[in-house]
């Protein structure tokens, strides 16, 4: 593994602002078979991923950043419901979710930028319900990685929809056999 | 695994046309640390992936489709050089590669659509140098999956650049430890 990139707030915001347009490019107007396909029971479709990212905007990353910045005596995060979106978005269209995610993300990044966080603030800690103490810097880095992880998931799930159509190419397209046992 | 999607030419073209805009959304103007980072020696950076996709436009998918449609006595594909882009693109900017990929892809999809392929034509076979007989339908499905695989790779490689910055979050972000042994 090469030297990895050090955390940088502006660069993080720059990556985070790309996710809504990336998802629009991948998914807006795509057929239902692609939008709703999964990797098997209890795994996310691209539609589910957009809902999960909306949950993150509403209940996770910025909510936890606020808890840290409040500097209270018990900066403990609330547990995060990974399946909140299932009920919330029943009956919604993918297009409306994409638009909602873009709006929520833009507002969150505007707020984040407005905080003009200092290095000392980025060092402040909160308590993750299962991981223990984490800094604001680590929280924001995890937000970036979480986005990219789910973008990788969307493209992997889409790829798998053509698994039976590529004939002898399967061994040359390892994404098709990636994570046979679902893990997220 | 659920029932997978059956090959459909229009839907395939619709997915293929999304890749240049998806890559633009992810990568245009991104910092060098993100564009040039890799997963370790002999693995592709996002910059390399765009170059590899350009090679595919110029030497792989449509060239092979033409060989199949020519119905010659020996419809054998030429071997594909996975590292052609390394020499070809030394000194190029990511932005110029993104623009070139978009242009080549648009032209290839216009040509593909102009062929108005019939089911009988999609059943025609060529010979892959190592996989043996493959149909035109399988070739086009593999093109779609290949795109999505490399989009997943770009986001995974980007995610890994923040591996050392997320602190205790590593086990909750499995993309960070995905494919420790590089495979493509």
Image (spheres, coloured by chain):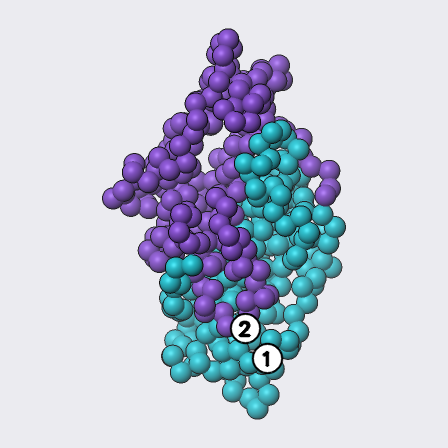
Chain colours: A cyan, B purple
Image location of residue B146, percent across then percent down: 52, 37
From this viewpoint, is residue B105 visible? no
| For the residues bearing labels 1 and 2, Cβ distance under 8 angstroms | yes
Residue at figure coordinates x 57%, y 42% from the top left: A174
Q: Quadrant of the C terminus of chain A?
A: bottom right
Compare residues B73 and B48 and report the one nearer the observer.
B73
Could you say which quadrant of the image residue B40 lies in? bottom left
Q: Chain of mark 2?
A: B
- Is A52 left or right of A4, judged from the image as shown? right
Taking A102 as reference, is B72 above or below it? above
Badge 1 and badge 2 in a common chain? no
- Is A9 left or right of A36, judged from the image as shown? left
10 Å neighbourhood of mark 2: few (<14), some, or many (≥20)?
some
Image location of residue A64, percent across then percent down: 56, 75
Q: Chain of mark 1?
A: A
Image location of residue A131, percent across then percent down: 60, 75
Image location of residue A88, percent across then percent down: 70, 60
Residue at figure coordinates x 42%, y 48% from the top left: B43
Residue at figure coordinates x 41%, y 43% from the top left: B49
Where disc 1 sits, the SS reads strand
- Is B96 left or right of B177, judged from the image as shown? left
Where disc 2 sits, the SS reads helix
Q: Which residue is mark 1?
A: A132
Residue at figure coordinates x 58%, y 21% from the top left: B133
Specify the farthest residue to the bottom: A73
Specify the farthest residue to the left: B91
Compare residues B181 and A79 and report the one nearer the observer.
B181
Q: Which residue is mark 2?
A: B168
């Amino acid at each position: 593994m090469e030297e990895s990139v050090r955390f940088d707030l502006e660069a993080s915001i720059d990556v985070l602002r790309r996710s809504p347009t990336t998802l629009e490019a991948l998914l807006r107007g795509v057929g239902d078979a692609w939008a709703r396909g999964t990797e098997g029971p209890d795994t996310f479709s691209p539609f589910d991923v957009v809902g999960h990212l909306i949950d993150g905007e509403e209940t996770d990353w910025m909510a936890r950043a606020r808890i840290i910045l409040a500097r209270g005596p018990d900066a403990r995060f609330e547990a995060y419901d990974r399946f909140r979106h299932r009920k919330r978005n029943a009956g919604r269209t993918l297009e409306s979710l994409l638009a909602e995610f873009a709006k929520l993300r833009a507002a969150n990044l505007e707020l984040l930028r407005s905080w003009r966080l200092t290095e000392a603030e980025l060092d402040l800690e909160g308590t993750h319900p299962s991981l223990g103490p984490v800094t604001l810097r680590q929280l924001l880095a995890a937000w970036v990685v979480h986005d990219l992880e789910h973008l990788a998931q969307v493209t992997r799930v889409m790829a798998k929809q053509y698994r039976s159509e590529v004939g002898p190419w399967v061994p040359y397209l390892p994404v098709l056999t990636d994570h046979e046992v679902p893990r997220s």
